[in-house]
Amino acid sequence: DQQVKQNSPSLSVQEGRISILNCDYTNSMFDYFLWYKKYPAEGPTFLISISSIKDKNEDGRFTVFLNKSAKHLSLHIVPSQPGDSAVYFCAARREYGNKLVFGAGTILRVKS
Amino acid sequence: EPEVTQTPSHQVTQMGQEVILRCVPISNHLYFYWYRQILGQKVEFLVSFYNNEISEKSEIFDDQFSVERPDGSNFTLKIRSTKLEDSAMYFCASRKGLAGARGANVLTFGAGSRLTVL
């Protein structure tokens, strides 16, 4: 059941450049989307979210874009820092739903 | 900052044994969850709990699994008879859930309990 897909297992970016992580979803009932960051041996940590009524949400270096017609969202990190190196999970929730459905994750490596 | 705490951080058990994983969710949160991540795979939903009962569960959450909130603060996951394929990282999470409250939809996760079944 791959309702949330992160097709890039890994991404390598130079420090200071932009990191773009992508996520696609298939369930049109999803109305709330989140990005989580996960370091080894730790739980996922909330990063940023976006409601389906918006197409962009920004928080410091992190911006999430939502394209509902394409069922696609992306996370932009500018500028990327070595401390951003982690696994990034996209997650989605249905309207009036309870659980989050996660993608498989993308490993981001920021090189200094 | 409030956090979700989980114990133990790592448990090794023999196949067929019972295991209880413990969680203390954030105190003013209303919804509680267990997720698991098998090594190299995605984070999978197991069960959600609200108002002292299961609100949703996945097909993974079969009769071998149960959850309990025995004392208003702890939230436990019990696996009655562990199998090799239960080896995974188990994450507890909680969220406020109050409509309109800031962050109401955000799940806060614990650091996880690694279960190894031999």
Image: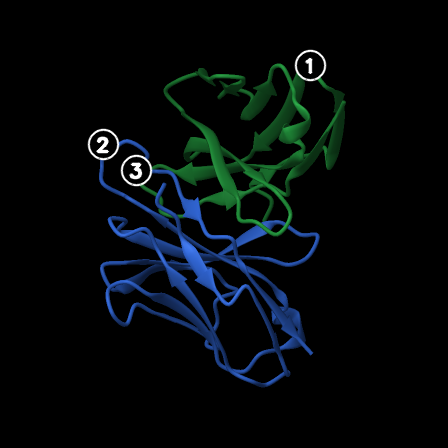
Mark number for residue A16? 1
Residue type at numbered disc 1? Gly
As drawn, the chain in blue is: B
Q: CA distance from mark 3 to mark 2?
A: 7 Å
Q: CA distance from mark 3 to mark 1?
A: 33 Å
- Judged by depth in the image, the label closer to the viewer, 3 or 1, is 1
Quadrant that contains the N terminus of chain B: top left
Could you tell me which chain the residue with mark 2 belongs to? B
- Judged by depth in the image, the label closer to the viewer, 1 or 2, is 1
Q: Are marks 3 and 2 on the same chain?
A: yes
Q: CA distance from mark 1 to mark 2?
A: 36 Å
Q: Are marks 1 and 2 on the same chain?
A: no
Residue type at numbered disc 2? Gly
Q: How many marks?
A: 3
Could you tell me which chain the residue with mark 1 belongs to? A
Q: Is residue B26 above or below residue B113?
A: above
Q: Are marks 3 and 2 in contact (CB under 8 Å)?
A: yes
Quadrant that contains the C terminus of chain B: bottom right
Judging by the rendered image, the residue that carries numbered circle 3 is: B104
> Left or right: where does residue A87 sit relative to residue B98?
right
> Left or right: where does residue A23 sit relative to residue A100?
right
Could you tell me which chain the residue with mark 3 belongs to? B
Which one is nearer the viewer's eye here, A108 or B1?
B1
Disc 3 on helix, strand or loop?
loop
Q: Position of residue A4 (x, y in %)?
A: 57, 38
Disc 2 on helix, strand or loop?
loop
As drawn, the chain in green is: A
Judging by the rendered image, the residue that carries numbered circle 2 is: B100
Which one is nearer the viewer's eye here, A97 or A77?
A77
Q: Quadrant of residue A108?
A: top right
Please rate how many residues cluster around mark 2, counting C-alpha atoms within 10 Å: few if below 14, some from 14 to 19, many from 20.
few
